[in-house]
Amino acid sequence: MTGNAGLNYAAWQLAKRGWHAMPTIRNARGSDLFVTNNDETIFFGVQSKALSKRAAVPLGKDGHELRSEWWIITLGAMTDHPTCFILSNDDVRARASIDKGGQGGRWLEPSAFDREEFREAWHRLLPVPDAAAATSVEARS
């Protein structure tokens, strides 16, 4: 349920900022959301990771599988006030650590993503698809 809550929360946050977000098939490799603007001139994939508490995010064994252009990590996904961290694929790759236990798994430690530069950093998904929608969202915030 935590994963679903985080995915839907991320989609809602994107929608209220003027983006169209469509979930992909569950457990498919790659993006969890496909996102586009109104005229479909901007299109990108989002990997959604949802956590119930502050913990490391598993990234798998192969760094080449980190394909989505953007990552949204939702902390406290099942609470009334989740927090999202918005990272680019390059951010994730640069901050990933490799399991020292010999398994070769990759992780994104909390200290790597739980940073002010990524916290609720929706502005990183520029350009905003519709200036009127962005102004409306800013006015409500």
Image (tube, rainbow, N blue to C red):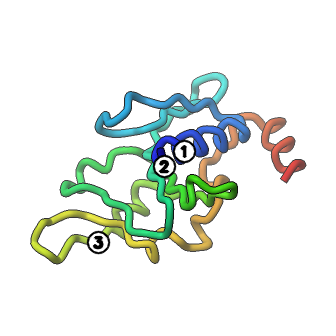
Categorize mark 1 by other alpha carbons within 10 Å: few (<14), some (14-19), many (20+): some
Residue drawn at x 59%, y 38% as measured from the top left = 11
Residue 98 point in image, percent of width and height: 23, 70
Residue drawn at x 71%, y 35% as measured from the top left = 18
Categorize mark 2 by other alpha carbons within 10 Å: few (<14), some (14-19), many (20+): some
Residue 104 point in image, percent of width and height: 15, 65
Q: Is residue 17 above or below residue 78?
A: above
Q: Earlier in the sequence, mark 3 or mark 1?
A: 1
Q: Quadrant of residue 31?
A: top left
Q: Earlier in the sequence, mark 2 or mark 3?
A: 2
Residue 6 point in image, percent of width and height: 53, 47
**Residue 121 at least partly seen:** no
Foreground pick, 10 / 96:
10
Callout 2, which amino acid? Thr
Q: Which mark is residue 97?
A: 3
Residue drawn at x 89%, y 49% as measured from the top left = 139
Q: Element under label 2?
A: helix
Give me the C-alpha separation between circle 2 and circle 3: 24 Å
Foreground pick, 99 / 65:
99
Q: Element under label 3?
A: strand
Callout 1, which amino acid? Ala
Categorize mark 3 by other alpha carbons within 10 Å: few (<14), some (14-19), many (20+): some
Q: Which residue is mark 1?
A: 5
Q: Give the residue at the far right of this rendering.
A: 139
Foreground pick, 81 / 96:
81
Give me the C-alpha separation between circle 2 and circle 1: 5 Å
Q: Is residue 32 left or right of residue 14?
A: left
